[in-house]
Image: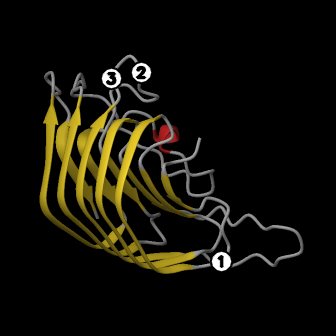
């Protein structure tokens, strides 16, 4: 399923110097913002701002992977990059526990791979409301799946209800807030080197 604002999936070409702003997203099971490089695309100098989301699965998903699928007669490329991305002024409400593709849901998933890290990524002024409902032992083993199609649902329930991030060189977070409508025993945020 596609995201409302999506870079990738099947992209060997580059995306750069792109600004997206002032959008409203409603009722999307594919997710809100997806930035995906798994087939060699270099994604850099991207700004996404002033986005309102209501009733969406996974408001923000950023994935650098190593699938490296080729198309037609193109040669296989090196692993791509994701760098200098700014996501700011976001308000989102996720789907309910009953409607979510992953239940309980999380707000933000950012992951590179052990051998290829995402570069610089900034999150500013983000407010996400989630249903809660997570248990303390949810998501203890999050798969890497470096060569698989990049879909947030493949990672299953995450160990953090707000932000789960790993394999990133420089993640800057400013005024990022998560509200849960019922108790959630998972971590609010979990950032792994």
Q: Which of 173 and 24 is in front in this view?
A: 24
Q: Mark 1 points at which residue?
A: 13
Residue 159 sits in quarter: top left
Colouring scheme, one of rainbow, by chain, secondary structure, one colour: secondary structure
Estimate how packed mark 1 is, as few (under 14), some (14 to 19) or many (20 or more) residues with alpha carbons within 10 Å: some
Q: Where is residue 8 in the image (x, y as percent from the top left)?
A: 59, 62
Q: Distance between the residues labelled 2 and 1?
A: 35 Å
Q: Where is residue 112 in the image (x, y as percent from the top left)?
A: 44, 64
SS at mark 2 in the image: loop
Q: From what the image shows, is residue 16 above or below residue 21?
A: below
Q: Name the residue under label 3.
A: 96
Q: Mark 2 points at which residue?
A: 99
For the point 89% across and 74% down, which residue is it? 73
SS at mark 3 in the image: loop
Q: Where is residue 118 in the image (x, y as percent from the top left)?
A: 40, 71
Furthest residue toward left:
175
Q: Do the residues labelled 2 and 3 touch (CB within 8 Å)?
A: yes
Q: From what the image shows, is residue 143 above or below residue 79?
A: above
Q: Position of residue 58 (x, y in %)?
A: 38, 42
SS at mark 1 in the image: loop
Residue 54 falls left or right of residue 113: left
Q: Nearer the viewer, residue 10 or 193?
A: 10
For the point 63% across and 74% down, which residue is it? 40
């Amino acid at each position: 399923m596609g995201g409302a604002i999506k870079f990738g999936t099947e992209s060997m070409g580059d995306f750069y110097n792109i600004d997206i702003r002032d959008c409203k997203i409603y009722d999307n099971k594919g997710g809100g913002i997806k930035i995906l490089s798994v087939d060699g695309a270099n994604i850099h100098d991207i700004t996404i701002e002033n986005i309102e989301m209501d009733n969406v699965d996974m408001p923000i998903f950023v994935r650098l992977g190593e699938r490296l699928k080729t198309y037609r007669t193109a040669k296989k490329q090196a692993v791509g990059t994701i760098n200098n991305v700014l996501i700011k002024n976001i308000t989102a409400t996720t789907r309910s526990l009953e409607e979510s593709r992953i239940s309980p849901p999380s707000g933000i998933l950012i992951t590179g791979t052990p051998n290829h890290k995402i570069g610089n990524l900034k999150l500013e002024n983000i407010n996400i409301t989630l249903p809660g409902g997570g248990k303390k032992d949810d998501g203890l083993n999050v798969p890497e799946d470096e060569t698989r199609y990049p879909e947030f649902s493949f990672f299953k329930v995450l160990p953090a209800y707000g932000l789960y991030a790993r394999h990133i060189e420089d993640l800057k977070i400013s005024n990022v807030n998560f509200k849960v409508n019922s108790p959630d025993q998972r971590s609010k945020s979990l950032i792994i080197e």
